[in-house]
Image (cartoon, helix red, strand yellow):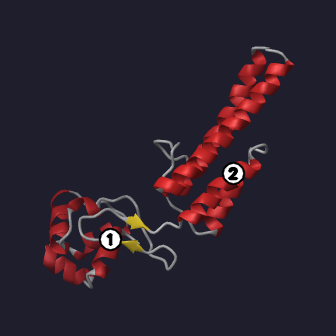
Amino acid sequence: MSILKAIREQKNLTQEELSEKSKISIRTIQRIESGTEPKGHTLRALAQALGIQENVLQDKVVIAETDQAKIERKEGEQVRENINYSFIKIINLSSLLFVIVPPFNILVPLLLTFKMKQKNSLTRQIISVQILWTVMAPIVFMLGIFLKPGSELTLALIIIIILSNIFVILRNAAAIARDKKMFYRLNFSII
């Protein structure tokens, strides 16, 4: 569902009524509700007719309201999702069980995300951090092998790599419990 359609329906307006109120053609409203981004005069007219700020109609996030995660939107406010932080902690800590088997430290949290219906920015960050660690760990390990430090130091390198992921998972779990956000997060999302 597009943002325009969600707001229009929330205000109990038909496309025709919105067209009359904003002086924008019905066809343009239909195109915007199908995914075209409103710009310029169209954006201003629709925002004014709906009594909202223009940036609300430019949001890239399309949100479907469900019983599990109701979304509250007040005029001019950002979208907030009701997140179950207990589930988020479980998803984060599930990576801990599979630190030694790298593909599972990604797959298990990903499966739990869908099972617990917690598809949000926090779970995407948790999985993105694990993907990044899973990619970087073999690179660091291979660099360590090419430097030929000896078998004792190679074993120590493996232990340090594993302990670094354990530390990241536990530090993020503490931050989620205390601050409701991750301590180690990326500025981008891999998924």
Circle 1 crowding by C-alpha within 10 Å: few under 14, some 14–19, many from 20: few
Q: Position of residue 167 (x, y in %)?
A: 64, 40
Does the image show residue 182?
yes
Image quarter in which the N terminus is found: bottom left
Q: CA distance from mark 2 to mark 1?
A: 33 Å
Counting residues from the start of the chain, the first of labels 2 and 1 encountered is: 1
* Vertical placement of residue 113 versus 71, above or below: above
Q: Are marks 2 and 1 in contact (CB under 8 Å)?
A: no
Residue 11, image x and y in percent?
Answer: 26, 81
Position above or below: 160 against 48: above
Q: Residue at x 25, y 69 (%)?
A: 28
Q: Residue at x 25, y 83 (%)?
A: 13
Q: Viewer-proximal residue, 64 or 98?
A: 98
Amino acid type, label 1: Arg
**SS label for mark 1:** loop
Q: Which residue is mark 1?
A: 73
Q: Name the spot of residue 23 as percent of width and height, x first.
A: 13, 73
Q: Is 37 on the left or on the right of 69, as rendered?
A: left
Q: Residues within 10 Å of mark 2 (few under 14, many from 20)?
A: many
Q: In the rendered image, which quarter is residue 46 located in?
A: bottom left
**Residue plotted at (34% across, 69% down):** 3
Q: Nearer the viewer, mark 2 or mark 1?
A: 2
Rendered image quadrant of residue 30:
bottom left
Q: Is residue 115 positioned above or below 158 on the image? A: below
- Describe the element under mark 2 as helix, strand or loop: helix
Q: How many marks?
A: 2
On residue 95, the disc is 2
Q: Is residue 59 left or right of residue 99?
A: left
**Mark 2: amino acid:** Ser
**Left or right: 22, with 128 as reference point:** left
Q: Is residue 191 visible?
A: no
